[in-house]
Amino acid sequence: MNPKRKKKLIGIICILLLLSGAISLALYALKQNINLFYMPTQLLQAHVLPNQTIRIGGYVKKGSLHYDSTGNGVTFLITDNKNDIPVEYHGILPNLFREGQGVVTTGKLSAKNKFFAQELLAKHDEKYMPWPLAQSLKGSKS
């Protein structure tokens, strides 16, 4: 093989090795930071260890929302219309939180499939529109 071509080939192979190493490190770092959640049916089928921090998502089941006497705690059921998971949360609730609303919560699952939430996020639907924009569009239609 020509020495010039051999040098070029070695250079290209080194660049490809460095590039593949950088890409694999970036993908590994992204895997650590990805925020996925389990739906109740997936959670019941998964092998989650008790007291392992996980995220679950679904809808707050209608008629399941109960506040404790102090007003700081709330219990409710997260549902995916197949299975339900009881959730207990102590803290300030998001403004959009209500029955029938989508939620994602981070916490720990007990051995008895009760979820103790540490963080609660309410999800809005696809039709969500900020109030000022909705008012301006309403005013322009009339």
Image: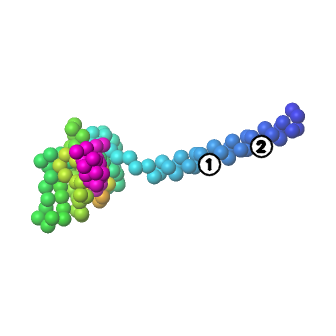
Q: Where is residue 82 in the image (x, y as percent from the top left)?
A: 22, 37
Q: Which colour scheme is used?
A: rainbow
**Start-end of magenta stretch:** 120-142
Q: Nearer the viewer, residue 8 or 51?
A: 8
Taking the spot 29% from the left edge, 59% from the top edge, the residue there is 118
Q: Which of 124 and 117 is in front in this view?
A: 124
Q: What residue type is labelled 2?
A: Gly
Taking the spot 78% from the left edge, 41% from the top edge, the residue there is 10
Q: Is residue 4 visible?
A: yes
Taking the spot 77% from the left edge, 43% from the top edge, the residue there is 11
On residue 77, the disc is none
| 135 up-or-down from 16: above or below | below
Q: Where is residue 121 in the image (x, y as percent from the top left)?
A: 29, 54
The residue that mark 2 highlights is: 11
Between the residue at mark 1 and the residue at mark 2, the CA separation in whole angstroms equals 17 Å
| 53 up-or-down from 1: above or below | below
The residue that mark 1 highlights is: 22
Q: What residue type is labelled 1?
A: Ala
| 73 up-or-down from 79: above or below | below
Residue farthest along the bottom direction in this orientation: 70
Which badge, 1 or 2, comes first in the chain's sequence? Answer: 2
